[in-house]
C-alpha cells in the first residue's frame, strides 16, 4: 500500500513519511499558485464524463472520481477550520480524521459533483483570501496535530497544496482507467 493512502490506522507511525511524500509532490511549485489553480483543474479533470464514469472506481476497493472530489470538498472545510483555529487560538489541538470513515459514513458515493465543486470553489476562495491577508508572524503560528505534531500555517499551506497535487494526479489516473 502506498504511503500516500494516508491510512488512519497507521497515521502516527507514517506521519513523517507521509509529510515528506506530499511535500515532495509539491516540489518547487508555488503553493498558493497550486491552491488557486486546483478548482479549475478539478473541473477540467471531470469534464465530459458521465455519472457512471464518475462513480466507477479505478479498481475494486479504491475510490471513484466522485469520492475524490467529495473528499476534497470536506478536506477544504477541515482546513478552513484548522487555519482559523491556529490564527485565533494559541497552539490549538488539531485532530486528524479517518478519511475512509468519512467517505463511507458521509456517503461520498451519493455526492453531486457540481455541488462538491461549488463547495470547493467557495471554501478555497475564502481560504486564499484569508491566507493572503496574513502577515509573516501569523503564518508562523502553530497548531499541534494529533498525528504529525506541531504545524505552522506556512507548513499547512505547503501540505494542502501537495495534497491538491496528490489528488489531481489521482483523478487523472482514475479518468484514464475508467474511460
Image (cartoon, rainbow, N blue to C red):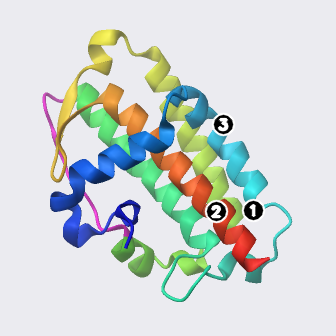
Q: Nearer the viewer, residue 60 or 65?
A: 60
> With respect to residue 8, does 38 lie above or below?
above
- Regarding residue 112, the answer to whether it shows in the image is no
Q: Residue at position x 60%, y 42% from top? A: 122
Spatial separation of the CA atoms under disc 3 and disc 1: 15 Å
Identify the secondary structure beneath mark 1: helix
Cβ atoms at labels 3 and 1 below 8 Å apart: no
Q: Mark 1 sits on what residue? A: 46
**Which contiguous range is marked in magenta?**
89-99
Crowd around label 1: few <14 · some 14–19 · many ≥20 (10 Å): many
Of labels 1 and 2, the one closer to you: 2
Identify the secondary structure beneath mark 3: helix
Cβ atoms at labels 1 and 2 below 8 Å apart: yes
Answer left or right for 82 relative to 80. left
Residue 64 position in % (x across, y down): 60, 76
Spatial separation of the CA atoms under disc 2 and disc 3: 15 Å
Crowd around label 3: few <14 · some 14–19 · many ≥20 (10 Å): few
Spatial separation of the CA atoms under disc 1 and disc 2: 8 Å
Q: Mark 2 sits on what residue? A: 171
Magenta stretch: residue 90 in it? Answer: yes
Amino acid at each position: 500500500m502506498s504511503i500516500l493512502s494516508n491510512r488512519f490506522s497507521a497515521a502516527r507511525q507514517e506521519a513523517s513519511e507521509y509529510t515528506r511524500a506530499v511535500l515532495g509532490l509539491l516540489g518547487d511549485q508555488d503553493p498558493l499558485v497550486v491552491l488557486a489553480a486546483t478548482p479549475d483543474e478539478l473541473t477540467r479533470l471531470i469534464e465530459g464524463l458521465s455519472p457512471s464514469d464518475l462513480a466507477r472506481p479505478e479498481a475494486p476497493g479504491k475510490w471513484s472520481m466522485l469520492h475524490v472530489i467529495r473528499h476534497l470538498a470536506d478536506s477544504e472545510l477541515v482546513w478552513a477550520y484548522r487555519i482559523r483555529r491556529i490564527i485565533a487560538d494559541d497552539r490549538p489541538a488539531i485532530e486528524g480524521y479517518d478519511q475512509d470513515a468519512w467517505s463511507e459514513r458521509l456517503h461520498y458515493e451519493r455526492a453531486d459533483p457540481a455541488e462538491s465543486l461549488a463547495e470547493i470553489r467557495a471554501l478555497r476562495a475564502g481560504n486564499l483570501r484569508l491566507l493572503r491577508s496574513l502577515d509573516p508572524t501569523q503564518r508562523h503560528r502553530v497548531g499541534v496535530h494529533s498525528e504529525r505534531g506541531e504545524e505552522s500555517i506556512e507548513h499547512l499551506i505547503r501540505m494542502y497544496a501537495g495534497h491538491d497535487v496528490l489528488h489531481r494526479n489521482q483523478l487523472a489516473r482514475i479518468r484514464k482507467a475508467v474511460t
